Amino acid sequence: MAELTFRIEIPRPAASELSVRLQVPTPRSVPGHAPLEELTLFMPTWTPGSYLIREFSKHVVGPRAFDGSTRAPLPCVKVAKNRWMITLGRDTSSVDVEYTVYCHELSVRTADVTPDHAYWNNACVLLWPVGQRSASADITVCIPTQWSLTTSLPVIAETATTGSSLRNITIHASDMDRAFDCPCLAGSPKCIEWSSLGVPHRIVLDDLSGLTPPSTLAGDLDRIVSTTAKIFGGTLPYGNYTFLCLLTQDGHGGLEHLDSTTLLHSRTQLATRKGYLEFLSLAAHELFHAWNVKRLRPSEFVQLDYEAETFTPFLWLIEGWTAYYDDLICLRAGVFSAADYLTALGKNIQALLNNPGRLRTSLADSSFDAWIRLYRPDENTRNSSQNYYGNGAVAALCLDLLVRAQSDGTKSLDDIIRSLYETMPSDRGYALDDVLAVVERIGGQKARDYLVEAISGPFDPPLREVLAGHGIGLTLKDTDQLHLGLQFEPNGTVVASVGRNSAAWMAGVMPGDEILAVGGLRVDASRWSEVFTAVAKAQQAIELLISRRGVIKTIRALPAKSPGVAALEILNSADDKPRQLRDLWLQPGAVSKH
Ligand SMILES: [Zn+2]
């Protein structure tokens, strides 16, 4: 019998509410201890893997507390934004708590209840007693009989009442971390099962709305799983794995868990080759996290504080290395062609070129600030900090290619991350010195020095040179085109962001300015490109007529050459060594020996 028991019901799906009842034992006479006089419950303010305070408690109504035996109401007072304190009666030996949670946000991180499904993360639904981190919990979910429940927590009981349209399914969480790690989906999804390396896997597709998933889906995911396992030594770290997939009109995202992931993707995009490959890359990304972050983790993630930010300087490793491997795994698994892979890599390089903040705030500092920058972006974010996903992936690429070149292709980033995984105890977690020691042992002093420089200072890697050493050419196309370095808000010519050091920045254009005319010609969203291209000439100032906070002004700007569009190609003329290194790096199925 678990210490905590939860019962979750869906009384009126169209109201988007879950009704929750929690029972907590409150022993009054523990030898050697004063009787417990109060019980405090909390709801997490964020969910691991998504580094933003989301204030899940704003959706809680209630709670009300009762003596578990007499049903007498107990005082229950809110004492913090996400905490409630219950005063216990003299003889209270257990407390019943009842509350509802409003669930109307369909994302991988939140909760959504409709007449067609109920999806939730326990971190935004369960109130947990403060100080009872190791308490186990039985969670009974009451759902319509025709629905199934998808969760990676073990099912310990299932009851259907004859004549009732509802049934109860009870799942068990061994402790608080396990309970909060697990997403749940109740509904009528399509489930496809297979075995990878002898371990059960499944993909559960919610809301296909009559569409048929690609027939290659399970086979491709199977190859992605075994390719990923090979990097980490050939075995899987879990007893079963669920790809829980929420299909929607638009959107794209994922959240990692110990032995499952929630993916969100456009259902119609899944039917296109491009959208399907993006989906597989997302699935590979979240699966890679089953090792990188869910088990191999920094020391600050060993005991997470669910009520406040858990800062880490390591998101360049947690997310950046994962973002490097997601596409590489798809290539090795044979689901990406070399051209698909180079296109994906080119996008990361392009994003890096459009991120002036990489020269001002390091990858480590940008990681630390994820909570207030990357997850709360504004017009200045790209000028002031780095995207540790894409730029972290490019830093991983450079480290990988350096180690490969230094060792004549006998060592790679695979050896580094595998060694980190095998040597770092997950109950202690790693510190920077641990990571650097492994990098130095496998890649040498040069690799260590490179990594220190890449994560702690301005990030401006010599990409052309690094890639040429592996027989890949990097060219920047369309550099003869002129530009100002502006980004517009959707459907207009209001400036959303001005790239630092760009032509517009030098001229004094500011975010929020609305550009009305260029060189005396009226512009709007549909004609901006055409008019600007006709009017702009290199090294000749043009006049911009703008509206700034309601005042019309004229600004003179000197259009500059575009930084270009990054394109990667296989250099057929490469010498033997770069060619051999390229083959080792990019051939399907390639994982360095260990
Ligand atoms: Zn990730």
Image (cartoon, rainbow, N blue to C red):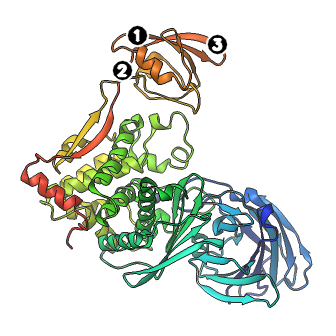
Q: How far apart are marks 2 and 1 (CA)?
A: 10 Å
Mark 2 or 3: the one toward you: 2
Q: Which amino acid does label 3 sit on?
A: Val
Q: Is residue 216 above or below residue 401?
A: below
Q: How far apart are marks 1 and 3 (CA)?
A: 22 Å
Mark 1 or 3: the one toward you: 1
Identify residue for label 2: 560
> x, y (%) of residue 394?
32, 49
Mark 2 vs 1, N-terminal side: 1
Q: What residue type is labelled 2?
A: Ala
* In the image: residue 425, left or right of residue 406: right
Rendering quarter of residue 222: bottom left
Residue 69 in view (yes/no): yes
Rendering quarter of residue 476: top left
Identify residue for label 1: 541
Identify residue for label 3: 551
User: Cβ–Cβ below 8 Å for labels 1 and 3?
Assistant: no
Q: What residue type is labelled 1?
A: Ala
Residue in view at x 47 percent, y 50 percent: 368
